[in-house]
């Protein structure tokens, strides 16, 4: 069509526009540049603070207390290396999912990446395409555009020559040609994106919580540090250099530097692992959203089924002859150039050429559920969902339901009158039923069983007949697949809809806006909702889901709004993706408990020893040894572990259940040790010996807690770390600023260690009991 009517730009004109920068390229990119990666890992608030503290220690001449900088440098190097590695993989995978545009240049049709579209290019568009540049319509073959991502209005807008197509909108019906008048950052969608994000961004409860912790901690650091320094400086007999070292110990204990690093590394590694499993993560936060999903909505075609269709039967109606139906279907199929699986099945069956001349056309849309055309001297014909076209014909619908009960799709071919301006038909008279078969994916049953084990409810939301969809869902092994409803029977009132959606697992004859409302209804019921789709009819639901997953083989519009794109377009790969997400989140929860324990007890100790006007109980080298053996090494190894666990909401609650009892135990134990110092004649080195040993033991108890449930790796970790910690104390006590453990006072460490263990167990049970009670009250409140 359009390629014959337009010449488009010449190669010289294209090169001229490229040299002027008039291309569709923007700075937005999924993958960060190497320069940005280095900056993000080095130019941080905590890195600068640690550097400042190291300089202060250097001035005191106590260089052994600068070892904490070695940890910072190693962490930074690991972070940069890991992100470089993942960037290489992401860049490779991104090429596979890049959106393309079809343009006319020098009279020839060319497929190019959307970034290479230049000003004044003639662009061909069809159903499912997202408009990549602001354009003027040159030719329209029933073009209808959804502009909801720009205007919020979901109703399709008809476009005729001379009308504007705005970037970010997408075709829901028809096809045509348009000329780009804006490109790149001049596009309306790009300008709008600077003002507000129209796509719902994936949320990360963890990252938001960690940011708040860091913000509060950052605000406390300076005033607490200054007060601690003034207190230490004024303690009788303490030198200025010792006051500085004690203050640095207090401040570095408050800094959860590894928490930020390992959280970001966990997400980056997760993105890399998912890319290796053929899933492109377009928003890093979506990994957590997907891991927390408890309702997963999906379409039937391409997920439960293979997406490949075949016409298996043609049943004449009202005395129509088979040869008449054959001729009508060949003409009707040839009148449209849709790109979808149904059209492919029809073209394969009705491929004969006809000399019928098209007068008027109404292209298919998910809203109408049909398409129609009128032909010169032949009249008008429509093909679509029987329930929409001939809803009063009970005998016909009974016959349709019989096929639907067998898992077959049925289209109605009918004679009709056309109202092209309204996109409607009238006076439909049945001519034939076109029966289409679909194939259930062999891996669907295993996939559904996996999600059942993970406590994720599957909801099938389809535009097809609900009986057909239900039958296929049951065949595929979906629990509750027999609970279905026709979406036309769903209530309009949103509060009623919230109640109704919980009753069904299969929704049929769903319009795009209804898909969106069903997703919102589950969200209103306190569910984390994932949506899997590939067509333009899924875009609204994908856009509003907590995690939208699109198929790479699907429409451009679906891929653009999705948070994750499945490269292989295989729903079965969702098992790996959800599993990977849950691994990442459970690992971060465990690692966060280690770091938050240190931050909490450091803040409390600073405040208490300021009030007591006593010397801070640790020096930097001692904290470095505790942190290295009981936080740094286990947190790094646990981050890399692949251990999938069910993820629940309430990240901070989960972390505090472990870290708060341990932190309080640490503070009470250290304070008790301080008050016992007269027993060994206020010998500060003996007090430091007790503090280091007990601090290490309590920190290792936290490691034990985060390693549960135990496996071989966890058992090895829980055995090796105490040995390493004890070896350091026994081999280099002088370097750590303590006495060897061969003095008679060391016997007191046995009852004190037992006391610390009992105290930790008691506080843990108390915290678990309180948080469990609160959670039960919250569930009762929401009716969960």
Image (spheres, helix red, strand yellow):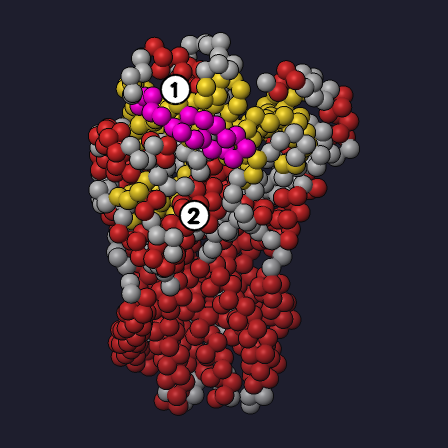
Q: Which mark is residue 293?
A: none
Instruction: Kindly indicate the quadrant of the structure image that contains residue 26.
Output: top right
Query: For the image shown, how many numbered marks are present on the structure?
Result: 2
Comparing 173 with 377, the one in front is 377
Horizontal side of residue 450 vs 611, given as left or right: left
Q: Is residue 345 above or below residue 649?
A: above
Horizontal side of residue 458 vs 275, given as left or right: left
Q: CA distance from mark 1 to mark 2?
A: 29 Å
Does 239 appear in magenta?
A: no
Which residues make up the magenta segment?
Answer: 416-434
Residue matched to label 1: 346
List x then y, in percent, for residue 280: 47, 39
- The residue located at (37%, 72%) in the rendering is 660
Residue matched to label 2: 516
Instruction: Kindly indicate the quadrant of the structure image that contains residue 29.
Output: top right
Q: Main secondary structure of the magenta part?
A: strand
Which quadrant does the N terminus fall into? top right
Q: Is residue 392 above or below residue 734?
A: above
List x then y, in percent, for residue 118: 70, 30
- The residue located at (66%, 43%) in the rendering is 188
Comparing 107 with 171, the one in front is 171
List x then y, in percent, for residue 390: 34, 32
């Amino acid at each position: 069509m359009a390629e014959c009517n337009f010449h488009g730009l010449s190669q010289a004109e294209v090169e001229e526009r490229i040299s002027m920068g008039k291309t569709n390229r923007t700075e937005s990119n999924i993958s960060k540049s190497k320069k940005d990666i280095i900056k993000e890992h080095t130019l941080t608030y905590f890195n600068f603070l640690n550097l400042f503290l190291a300089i202060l220690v250097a001035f005191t001449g106590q260089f052994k207390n600068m070892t904490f900088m070695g940890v910072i440098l190693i962490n930074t190097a690991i972070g940069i290396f890991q992100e470089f590695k993942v960037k290489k993989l992401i860049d490779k995978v991104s090429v596979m999912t890049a959106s393309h545009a079809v343009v006319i240049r020098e009279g020839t049709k060319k497929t190019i990446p959307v970034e290479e579209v230049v000003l004044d290019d003639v662009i061909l568009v069809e159903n499912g395409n997202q408009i990549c540049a602001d354009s003027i319509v040159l030719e329209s073959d029933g073009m209808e555009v959804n502009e909801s991502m720009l205007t919020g209005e979901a109703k399709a807008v008809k476009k005729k020559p001379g009308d504007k197509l705005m970037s970010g909108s997408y075709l829901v019906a028809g096809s045509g040609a348009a000329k780009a008048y804006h490109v790149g950052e001049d596009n309306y969608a790009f300008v709008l994106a600077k003002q507000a994000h129209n796509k719902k961004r994936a949320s990360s409860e963890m990252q938001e919580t960690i940011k708040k912790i860091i913000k509060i901690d950052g605000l406390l650091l300076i005033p607490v540090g200054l007060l601690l320094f003034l207190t230490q400086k004024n303690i009788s007999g303490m030198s200025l250099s010792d006051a500085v070292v004690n203050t640095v110990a207090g401040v570095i204990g408050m800094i959860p530097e590894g928490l930020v690093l390992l959280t970001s590394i966990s997400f980056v590694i997760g993105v890399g692992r998912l890319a290796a499993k053929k899933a492109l993560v377009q928003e890093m936060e979506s990994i957590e959203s997907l891991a927390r999903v408890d309702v997963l909505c999906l379409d039937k075609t391409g997920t439960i089924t293979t997406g490949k269709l075949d016409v298996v039967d043609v049943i004449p109606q009202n005395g129509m002859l088979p040869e008449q139906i054959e001729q009508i279907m060949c003409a009707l199929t040839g009148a449209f150039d849709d790109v979808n699986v149904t059209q492919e099945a029809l073209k394969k069956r009705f491929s004969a050429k006809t000399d019928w001349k098209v007068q008027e056309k109404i292209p298919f849309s998910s809203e109408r559920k049909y398409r129609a055309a009128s032909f010169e001297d032949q009249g008008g014909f429509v093909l679509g969902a029987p329930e929409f076209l001939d809803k009063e014909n009970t005998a016909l619908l009974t016959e349709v339901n019989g096929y639907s009960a067998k898992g077959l799709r049925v289209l109605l071919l009918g004679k009709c009158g056309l109202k092209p301006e309204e996109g409607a038909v009238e006076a439909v008279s049945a001519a034939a039923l076109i029966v289409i078969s679909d194939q259930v994916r062999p891996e669907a049953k295993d996939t559904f069983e996996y999600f059942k084990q993970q406590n994720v409810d599957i909801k099938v939301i389809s535009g097809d007949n609900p009986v057909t969809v239900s039958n296929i869902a049951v065949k595929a092994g979906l629990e509750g697949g027999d609970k279905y409803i026709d979406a036309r029977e769903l209530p309009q009132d949103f509060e009623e809809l919230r109640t109704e959606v919980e009753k069904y697992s299969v929704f049929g004859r769903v319009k795009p806006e209804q898909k969106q409302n069903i997703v919102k209804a589950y969200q209103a019921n306190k569910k984390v909702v994932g949506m899997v789709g590939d067509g333009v009819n899924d875009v609204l639901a994908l856009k509003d889901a907590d995690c939208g997953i699109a198929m790479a083989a699907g429409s451009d519009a679906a891929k653009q709004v999705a948070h994750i794109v499945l490269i292989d377009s295989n729903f079965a790969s969702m098992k790996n993706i959800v599993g990977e997400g849950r691994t990442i989140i459970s690992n971060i929860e465990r690692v966060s408990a280690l770091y938050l324990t240190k931050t909490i007890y450091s803040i409390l100790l600073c405040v208490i020893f300021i009030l007591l006007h006593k010397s801070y109980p640790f020096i930097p080298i001692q904290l470095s040894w505790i942190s290295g053996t009981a936080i740094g090494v286990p947190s790094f190894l646990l981050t890399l572990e692949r251990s999938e666990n069910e993820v629940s909401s309430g990240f901070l609650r989960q972390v505090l259940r472990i870290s708060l009892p341990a932190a309080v135990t640490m503070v009470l134990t250290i304070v008790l040790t301080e008050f016992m110092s007269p027993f060994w004649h206020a010998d500060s080195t003996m007090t430091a010996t007790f503090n280091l040993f007990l601090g290490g033991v309590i920190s290792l108890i936290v490691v034990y807690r985060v390693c549960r449930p135990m496996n071989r790796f966890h058992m090895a970790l829980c055995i090796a770390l105490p040995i390493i910690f004890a070896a350091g104390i026994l081999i280099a006590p002088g370097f750590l600023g303590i006495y060897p453990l061969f003095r008679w006072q060391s016997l007191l460490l046995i009852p004190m260690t037992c006391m610390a263990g009992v105290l930790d167990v008691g506080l843990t049970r108390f915290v678990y009991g309180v948080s469990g009670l609160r959670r039960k009250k919250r569930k009762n409140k929401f009716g969960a």
